[in-house]
Amino acid sequence: MTSYFLPRDLHPAAWWVWSLGLSVAATRTTNPWLLLTIVAVAGFVVVSRRSEAPWALAFRLYLALGAMIVVIRVGFRFVFGGAEGTTILLSLPEIPLPAWAAGIRLFGDVSAESLLSGLYDGLRLATMVICLGAANALANPKRLLKAMPPALYEVGTAVIVALSVFPQLAESVLRVRRARKLRGGSGKRLQVIHSIMIPILEDALSRSLQLAASMDSRGYGRAGLVEARHRLLTGTLMIIGLIGACVGIYATLDGSTPRYLAAPVLSAGLVIGLIGFRLAGRRVQRTRYRADRWHLPELVVAASGIGVAVVLFMTSLVDPANLNPSLIELSWPLLSWEPLAGVLIGVLPAFLTPAPEPPFATLEEVAAA
Amino acid sequence: MRTLAIAGAVTLLLGTAPAARAIDHSKGYPGFCKDDKGVTVVVDFQQLGGDAIVRCNPQTTAGSGLDAIKGAGFQIAGVQRWGEGFVCRIENKPGAADERCIDTPPAQAYWSYWHAANNCAWDYSQWGVKNRRFIPGGFEGWSFSLNATANSNPVPRIAAVRPGTENTPCTAVEEQKPVTDNPGEVQRPVQDTPPEAGHQATETPQPGAPTGALPPPKPRASASPKAKDPTGNIAFSGGENAEDVNAVVKRTSGASDYAPWAAGGAVLVLAVAGFFVARRRKRADG
């Protein structure tokens, strides 16, 4: 028990499972109370369990991105006809459109109901984005690459390079800003944005090239030993499998798609993908140096994320009205206890996991020895 | 433990959720309209059971059929695919167990949409609910059509006659052009319609069909038929005793008054705690 809380970095996949659980929960509801609680839960866990690594600084950017999504969603209700509903808040002059554009309305009346539906919808998307941001802030992308199954080795390399772009940009912003401060640079806000934009992009680009070069020199992406025909077969199988899985997951999560797209396509896609996995995995032989293992805290993290998703799935089967606030009549969105309690399960990792390893801990150890 | 409690709550909810019928009493008033300004909305449940409901929407400005039924205080639900352009459920009927209201309901079981001027016979609407303007002083009818064909669509069993105007003539109002031509907003298409099917037949394109414009309305019989004798009306109420719609939504969803406060409190507590944790960690790092 004493070793349970010893500071260490958790398995990155555990954090991803947790955050995907939260975002799946967010897809099931447009209730602003629940969505705000999910965001607060994700934020609190990030604040208390993120490491000092550069990717952990990106969470703020994701919050800003979420706010932007909400603003854009609501803004579009002003532009493209927001007159569903009876409580007209604002009467903008409508711009007449030619007959071929029938069905599209520019400006005109704006009702509270349509603004609210835009807000709820945007909040849901923003919450999902913020949950992914939480995973990016908590999970170490480099160790995630290490934990990839051999078959996903090539795809995984590309995905993880792509995933780490955003955190790297965040770090670039900080570095460039620090450098400017040291040089005593100040100025108007707009000017600052203009003057740090180029250095940031330049920095990120050169570091990507550096990363690519170093990965290349270490043998990543090597494919010379396998027959071209074999690679084509496994590649096709895996792509078909992944597309099937994506369509199946979409249909499972979205209640309005036909049911035959859900379970059958999902299972077929998974089977084809797994065959591809097996075939591809046979030819990639890699050993791992000190592989990450799943211990009890990792299981707690993953279980809490899955728990949130399961509770929201169950409650949405029972009372859809509660999770999608009705806009028949303007009123405060209702909420019952079960989904709220379910969402709060997600905060457990903030208390029941070891703190992240402090930076330079190993260096200090070496120095002390 | 928590999951057990949730499972218990779930079974409790499933066991007690009643088939709700609810009226928004702040809108419209029960019974027929008292003058020729508003529009009377008649909902005949047919095989779904229960007395018909007649309410008046006293709206004096022009509005669509959707405005009429909502303004009279009825509780409706559209389909997820088309929104309120296709009314799928009125007064929580048919229930969610029979009709999930995700895609357009089947032709065997749907709410048929009718209209009539005062003292005239009911007309099966040529257009969708958002595309018609209601007739001031007239009637809007909703009648559940179960296993009916184009010719046997059940007419609302309440005559379109305002009390006290039985002897006035029927002045038919010509069907107006649709307000929009969004193909998603048409009344359920009726297939296999014989060409001489009478004034109830409709020919509207399939929702989503790539037609540019809707066909013109069919010419009606020269002399508009008079309404039936109102003494043949079935039993109806004005929904006076029905519960308030928001109360029913609240009761059936098992919502609690305190849960939103708890959610707000949780958000606040987490934000404040996050702030302090962040500050502590910043200090610890120096």
Image (cartoon, coloured by chain):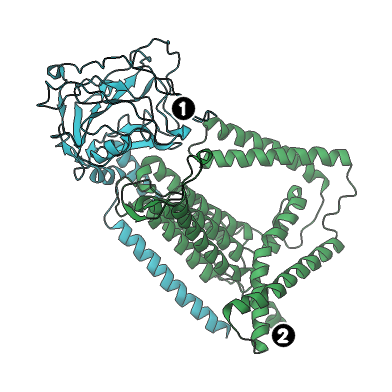
Chain colours: A green, B cyan
Q: Which residue is mark 2?
A: A367
Q: In which quarter of the view is residue A238 placed? A: top right
Q: Chain of mark 2?
A: A
Would residue A323 appear left or right of A293 to someone viewing this image?
left
In the rendered image, which quarter contains the C terminus of chain B? Answer: bottom right
Q: Are marks 1 and 2 in contact (CB under 8 Å)?
A: no
In percent of the image, x 66 and y 69: which residue is there? A169
Horizontal arrangement in the rendering, residue A315 relative to residue A152 (left or right): left
In this rendering, the answer to whether B66 lies above or below A354 is above
The residue wearing badge 1 is B214
Q: Would residue B232 appear left or right of A364 to someone viewing this image?
A: left
Give the side of residue A231 with respect to residue B15, left or right: right
Disc 1 residue type (three-letter): Leu
Type of amino acid under label 2: Ala
Seen from this angle, which residue lies furthest bottom?
A: A184
Q: Camera-side residue: B121 or A161?
A: B121
